[in-house]
Image: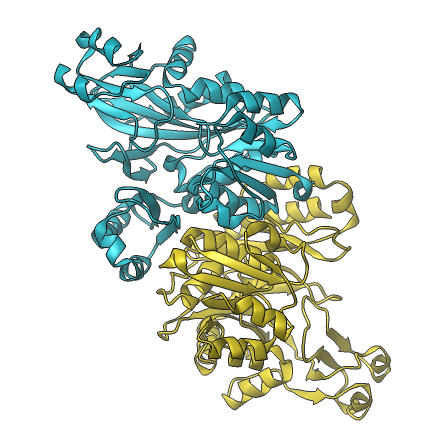
Chain colours: A cyan, B yellow
């Protein structure tokens, strides 16, 4: 059975690479589609296809010999996935789920229709339309589609910022008075079994909206974790999710939770589950889409995850920096092996585990110094 | 640096597969040589070569574009590895180390020459020679080369058993009065840094000499773990090892340690390090051969590892058995995805982790029932 199934992933970046890491545990055969022949996944499967996950023809051709298809990015061709589903392929998460989520405005409307608290926001057609909504500025402008790692997001502080704004369909959100940003990853399988990971606390770099680090478990006021679980589970059920879903949330200064964004795939905010949980988010995704029981999500170690962004210091002295980093006890390096990375690009991450949070924070400080 | 290195593994079985799993963490490019086009590793690299690790020509051709070469089995062509070393490739463990270990008699002589206690044994040429050594029976007969998982090992209880004996160069060992079988995995890098994992307690199936299960950490009398560490480190230094080495040892009823066998590569007795240690044996091997600092070896969870041998019950009802197994909290399945496995073949393993050894033993009993 497992060894005869043909599984496919749309997207071949580091999230796909980590998914392949866990596919090895189940002896699976996995094909990968990515438009970059040097994508991280290209090295780790005998079945890599160079093609565009956003192209109808490429996705259809990729899927035709597969049994189960999943994603490591939302920007994929929905029509091709629907066609593959019609042909009897299992597509998880479903094309309907991906479609709702891949557009940030549709996503927000879906959540509102299920009475889930979200950051208030309006749809914006283009720059001209933005001018008509000057009264909503200051606000946070997000492209409806294809944003990632801070690309496609900007804060409009004053009306003067409209000049620099995207001329693309966007969502203009209210600026919320945020105490914390947290995320919960929830898994759900075809049988409707649902399991959440503990909330993580996320720290973003201010100017770029890239996740700088995160701590798990998040230290929250009493009852907040339970509220976050309830929201995540409600969304998973509403979406009839099969797979995993990252639910990014704001905790406001008056301890209200608002959903910020969803991602129906492995997510940065779940990297630590490789080292800190019994079941990683990657294994959970595989269990969910293969109809297997979901795995235990409890964290057995506290952890802190640091993203590594390419920088000059790192580029010029990589060997020495890796040597120093790997000598830190409990530092787990995940280096994505991207070729020719531009400055500022996410090129790896480090998960630090230890016995106490204090110990971990100290090690993280050491690692930050090494990496910069 | 790391992403530009070309690494090669001789052998593409499950040990190679788990090594690839950890190579993903460092973004490495790994080529694999195996004579079976359906070997587990064949699916998990874009650079799989079908050829015989024992063939001079195949190994030489495989190695010519590589920077660093390692092994997941001892039965490899030493002459080709020496030639590759001459060409400036890094071959770790060194051809000299592999050569000493791949012949069980040479291995024993090497250990004796370094005053390391071993199971007493003599070299046997062939069946005729065995007849001349009837006085050494009962004893344990092991082929000098190419044994694995109980193949190439038999107990000669009486002289009558000679008839069934191998007609091949072998070692005839004394039968030792064993209390425990334990193993220590030791890592050593080029800089001479050495680190041991805690001893594991191994339980073998009586008739077949296949590892049935193992528990980590082993419960040993005071001072025995330290003695085992000292032996493992002494051997690693004597071999000038670069890589990892499994040292299988007997603890006799009077608490003496005798070295049974060595394996200079990832080993069954280190499977649990994936889930139970900060650094897995696979990552440790990669760190050692890439000149990186060795990782922390401490176990952060107690664990029990069960080998899965193909059997009729498992074959006829695989999906249902996997469903039951994966519903056991803390059960980590490693399924090797071997195609067309014969009955009795090692097809996977399960590592069970938990908070207490009692809890783990109970879960292991459940899993044994599921798998048989």
Horizontal and vertical percent position of residue A173: 26, 16
Front residue (pair B204, A259): A259
Depicted A127 relative to depicted A207: above or below: above
Name which quarter of the figure residue A115 lies in: top left
Q: Name the quadrant containing residue B100.
A: bottom right
Tell me if A337 is positioned left or right of B317 in this view: left
In the image, is A320 to the left or to the right of B214? Answer: left
Tell me if residue B149 comes above or below residue B25 in the rendering: below
Task: Give the image location of residue A282, x and y in percent.
Answer: 49, 39
| Position in image of residue B297 (x %, y %) | 41, 61
- Asked if residue A86 can be seen in this view, the reply is yes
Examine the rendered structure and indicate whether residue B33 appears above or below residue A88: below
Q: Is B48 placed above or below A167 here?
A: below
From the image, which quarter does the N terminus of chain B lie in? bottom left
Residue drawn at the location 42% of the way across and 13% of the way down: A110
**Image point 35% across, 54% down: which residue?**
A330
Q: Residue furthest bottom?
A: B132
The number of callouts visible is 0
Q: Look at 52% across and 49% down and name the residue there.
A: A44
Residue A104, horizontal then vertical, whole percent: 37, 19
Is residue A372 among the parts visible in the rendering?
A: no
| Front-lying residue, B10 or B285 | B10
Residue at 42% across / 67% down in the picture? B288
Which of the two residues, A193 or B343, is positioned nearer the viewer here? B343
């Amino acid at each position: 059975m497992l060894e005869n199934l043909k599984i496919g992933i749309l997207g071949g970046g580091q999230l796909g690479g980590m998914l392949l890491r866990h596919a090895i545990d189940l002896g699976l055969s996995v094909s990968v589609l990515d438009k970059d022949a040097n994508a991280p996944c290209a090295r780790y499967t005998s079945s890599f296809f160079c093609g565009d996950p956003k192209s109808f023809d490429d996705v259809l051709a990729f899927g035709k010999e597969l049994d189960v298809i999943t994603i490591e990015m939302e920007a994929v061709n929905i029509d091709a996935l629907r066609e593959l589903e019609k042909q009897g392929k299992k597509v998880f998460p479903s094309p309907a789920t991906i479609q709702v989520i891949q557009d940030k405005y549709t996503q927000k409307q879906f959540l509102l229709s299920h009475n889930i608290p979200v950051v208030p926001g309006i749809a914006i057609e283009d720059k001209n339309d933005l001018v008509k909504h000057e009264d909503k500025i200051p606000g946070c402008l997000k492209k409806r589609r294809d944003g990632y790692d801070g690309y496609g997001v900007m804060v409009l502080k004053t009306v003067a910022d409209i000049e620099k704004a995207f001329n693309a369909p966007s969502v203009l959100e209210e600026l919320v008075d945020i105490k914390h940003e947290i995320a919960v990853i929830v898994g759900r399988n075809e049988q409707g079994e649902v399991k959440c990971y503990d909330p993580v606390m996320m720290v973003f770099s201010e100017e770029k909206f890239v996740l700088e680090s995160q701590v798990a478990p998040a230290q929250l006021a009493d009852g907040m974790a339970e509220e976050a679980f309830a929201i995540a589970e409600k969304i998973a059920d509403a979406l009839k999710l099969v797979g995993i879903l990252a639910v990014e949330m704001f905790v406001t200064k008056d301890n209200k939770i608002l959903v910020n964004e969803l991602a129906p795939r492995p997510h940065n905010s779940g990297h630590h589950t490789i080292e800190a949980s019994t079941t990683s988010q990657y294994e959970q995704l595989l269990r969910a889409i293969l109809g297997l029981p979901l795995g235990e999500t409890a964290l057995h170690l506290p952890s802190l995850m640091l993203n590594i962004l390419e920088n000059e210091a790192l580029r010029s002295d990589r060997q020495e920096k890796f040597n120093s980093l790997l000598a830190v006890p409990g530092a787990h390096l995940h280096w994505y092996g991207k070729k020719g990375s531009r400055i500022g690009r996410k090129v790896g991450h480090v998960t630090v585990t230890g016995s106490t949070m204090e110990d971990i924070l100290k090690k993280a400080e050491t690692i930050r110094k090494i990496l910069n």
